Amino acid sequence: MSAVTAEALRVVPLLAELPAPTRTWLATVAEPMDLEAGEVLLAEGDEADALYVVLDGEVEIIKHLDEDVLVAVSGPGALVGELSVVHARPRTATVRAATPVRLLRFDAGVLAELVTDRDLALALLDTVGRRTQELELQLRHQEKMAQLGTLTAGLLHELNNPAAAVDRSVVRLGEVTAALQAPDAAPRDRQVLDRLGDLL
């Protein structure tokens, strides 16, 4: 991948309004990366040692609950991995390339230098706050869907049990009726069959 220019950083809303000298400095410390579709950029539980900017393509953010859940898809201009860096905690989700992706990697120390700029620090806090809220809403939604799935499975089980019992009874009734109608059936069997017919 070719060297990064200060102008290329303008695609990132958070960095677009930075003074040109700051963007030039960022361009010199950025590490360009290319990923193929399906490659993992960050794994849940990894150390938060960097944050990333998506230049081209899309990445999927995946959270492992009982199974892997797609939380979001981020495209050009998106910051990725900043939550863990800000909180100095292990990665809370896995990030995987959904398409071929061009990214910039910034070491975690770069963030510490950037937040000395008051406007940038406020913008970053706003971004982190929104991202946290989106993640929380998405996880709540997934939890509700999982509960609904459990409830539906339980309800279907309860409905299937009586239905199966009725089905078995109908089959057995057919067997008994056939036996009663057999040519060698006793006269009493025919009386039972007539009575059963009246009841039906």
Image (cartoon, helix red, strand yellow):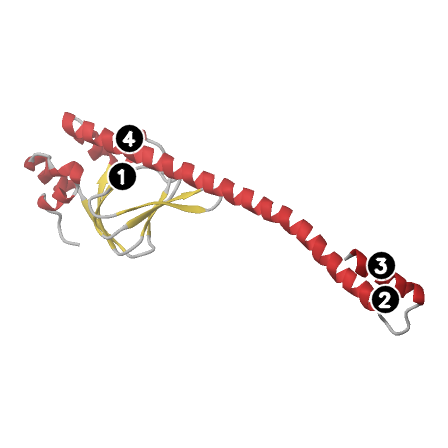
In the picture as drawn, the residue positioned furthest to the front comes out as 198
Sequence-first tag of 3 and 2: 2
Quadrant (top left/top right/bottom left/bottom right) for the C terminus? bottom right
Cα gap from disc 4 to disc 1, whole angstroms:
19 Å
Give the residue type that dot 3 points to. Arg
Residue 199 higher or lower than 113, as above or below:
below
User: Viewer-nearest of labels 4 and 2?
Assistant: 2
Q: Label 4 crowding class (10 Å Cα cut-off): few <14, some 14-19, many 20+?
A: few
Between label 4 and label 1, give the one nearer the viewer: 4
- How much space separates mark 3 and mark 2, taking CA atoms? 12 Å
Name the residue that disc number 4 marks.
129
Among numbered discs 4 and 3, the one appearing first in the sequence: 4
In the visual, does 175 lie left or right of 52?
right
**Marks 4,3: beta carbons within 8 A:** no
- Disc 3 and disc 2 in contact, CB within 8 angstroms: no
Mark number, residue 50: 1
The residue under label 3 is 195
| Residue 148 location (% of width, % of height) | 50, 42
Q: Residue at x 85, y 59 (%)?
A: 195
Q: Quadrant of the N terminus?
A: bottom left
Instruction: Kindly tell me whether residue 117 is visible in this rendering.
Output: no
Q: Relative to 100, does residue 47 appear above or below in the rendering? A: above
User: What secondary structure is marked by label 1?
Assistant: strand
The residue at the point 84 percent across, 62 percent down is 194
> Distance between the Cα atoms at labels 1 and 3?
83 Å
Residue at image point 23% right, 33% down: 109
Give whichever of discs 1 and 2 has the lower sequence position. 1
The Cα atoms of the two marked residues, 1 and 2, are separated by 81 Å
Circle 4: residue type: Gly
Looking at the rendered structure, the kind of residue marked 2 is Leu
For residue 180, the mark is 2
Mark 4 vs mark 3: give the one in front. Answer: 3
